[in-house]
């Protein structure tokens, strides 16, 4: 049996920082930053993180300092809104993100960087009107920046990152090399390596099984494949894939012999599966 679920939509917001100068001391002085990403909606377990403190997140909370973040649990979702109203970030379940940069340039550009340590996030932004404005998503493998686009990232265990562009262009950088990922294409970044050349976008959450069998009364073996850029959850646990998207698992066999799986693409498209062990 197969069940399809709608992709999670989350929004993120870019804000405005200020600086002032004075001729008396002939140097630039910082002024209090007034930037934030506002939480517009939540579903499931969403945790607000500030430093070493955590608490359940509620609508209206603002991430307004470097280091502030959100964590979503299994089957959870959240929506953030950029304070400049320039766009939205869509974040999926089992995702950990934080603000790593909020500033303005001397020319008035707004620079925002969000780090996704694990999970999936989708970003939608309108074209920027100020040249120095930047909106970037960083992962353990690299950084992806936009100037008006719709794109998503998926971060697997170990930091391997999938980048997929739906509209516009994304520049993905790692190990001193950059790759342009235009609309309709995707790229993969392995930690310690440059991004792969762009390849046609699949956005395909299919789960292809080659083996599903009970090894004994307590263990099940599952072997299969998904698109290598996708995230695979089995019984709410993120699974490790090889570079071709293949996996080979041995897990406890549930009493009802039914196993729940979920595949998520970098753009947030999801497909849920119920695997019935013969």
Image: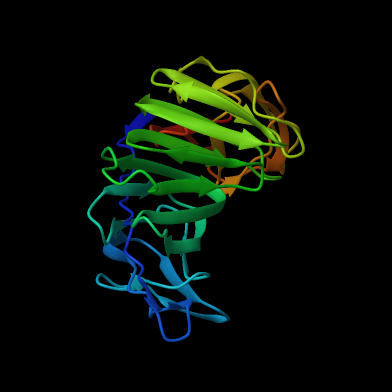
The quadrant the C terminus occupies is: top right
> Which residue does the image show at 63% across and 41% down from the upper left?
142
User: Horizontal placement of 61 versus 214: left or right?
Assistant: left
The quadrant the N terminus occupies is: top left
> Which residue does the image show at 72% across and 28% down from the upper left?
242
Residue 250 in the image: x percent, y percent? 73, 37
Q: Nearer the viewer, residue 154 or 139?
A: 139
Residue 187 in the image: x percent, y percent? 56, 25
Residue 232 in the image: x percent, y percent? 56, 36
Residue 229 in the image: x percent, y percent? 57, 29
Q: Residue furthest bottom?
A: 24
Q: How many marks?
A: 0
Q: Is residue 163 depicted above or below 183 in this figure? A: below
Q: Quadrant of residue 107?
A: bottom left
Q: Is residue 44 depicted above or below 90 in this figure? A: below
> Which residue does the image show at 37% across and 48% down from the upper left?
133
Q: Residue furthest top?
A: 200
User: Horizontal placement of 120 versus 4: left or right?
Assistant: right
Q: Nearer the viewer, residue 273 or 240?
A: 240
Residue 109 in view: yes
Q: Is residue 102 depicted above or below 232 in this figure? A: below
Q: Nearer the viewer, residue 91 or 272?
A: 91
């Amino acid at each position: 049996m197969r069940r399809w679920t709608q992709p999670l939509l989350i929004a993120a917001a870019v804000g405005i920082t200020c600086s002032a100068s004075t001729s008396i001391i002939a140097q630039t002085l910082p002024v209090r930053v007034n930037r934030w990403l506002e939480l517009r909606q939540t579903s499931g377990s969403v945790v607000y993180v500030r430093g070493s403190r955590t608490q359940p997140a509620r609508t209206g909370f603002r991430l307004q300092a470097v280091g502030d973040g959100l964590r979503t649990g299994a089957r959870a979702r959240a929506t953030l809104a950029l304070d400049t109203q320039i766009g939205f970030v869509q974040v999926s379940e089992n995702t950990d993100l934080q603000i790593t940069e909020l500033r303005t340039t001397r020319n008035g550009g707004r620079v925002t960087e969000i780090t996704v340590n694990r999970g999936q996030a989708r970003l939608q932004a309108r074209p920027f009107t100020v040249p120095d404005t930047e909106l970037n998503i960083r992962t353990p493998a690299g950084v992806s920046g936009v100037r008006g686009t719709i794109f998503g990232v998926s971060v697997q265990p170990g930091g391997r990152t999938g980048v997929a562009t739906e509209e516009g262009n994304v520049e993905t950088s790692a190990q001193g090399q950059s790759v342009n990922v235009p609309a309709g294409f995707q790229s993969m970044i392995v930690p310690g390596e440059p991004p792969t050349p762009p390849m046609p976008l699949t956005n395909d959450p299919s789960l292809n099984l080659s083996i599903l069998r009970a090894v004994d009364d307590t263990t099940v073996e599952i072997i299969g494949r998904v698109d290598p850029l996708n995230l695979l959850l089995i019984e709410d646990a993120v699974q490790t894939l090889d570079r071709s998207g293949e996996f080979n698992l041995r897990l406890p066999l549930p009493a009802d012999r039914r196993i729940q799986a979920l595949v998520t693409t970098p753009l947030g498209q999801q497909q849920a599966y119920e695997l019935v062990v013969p």
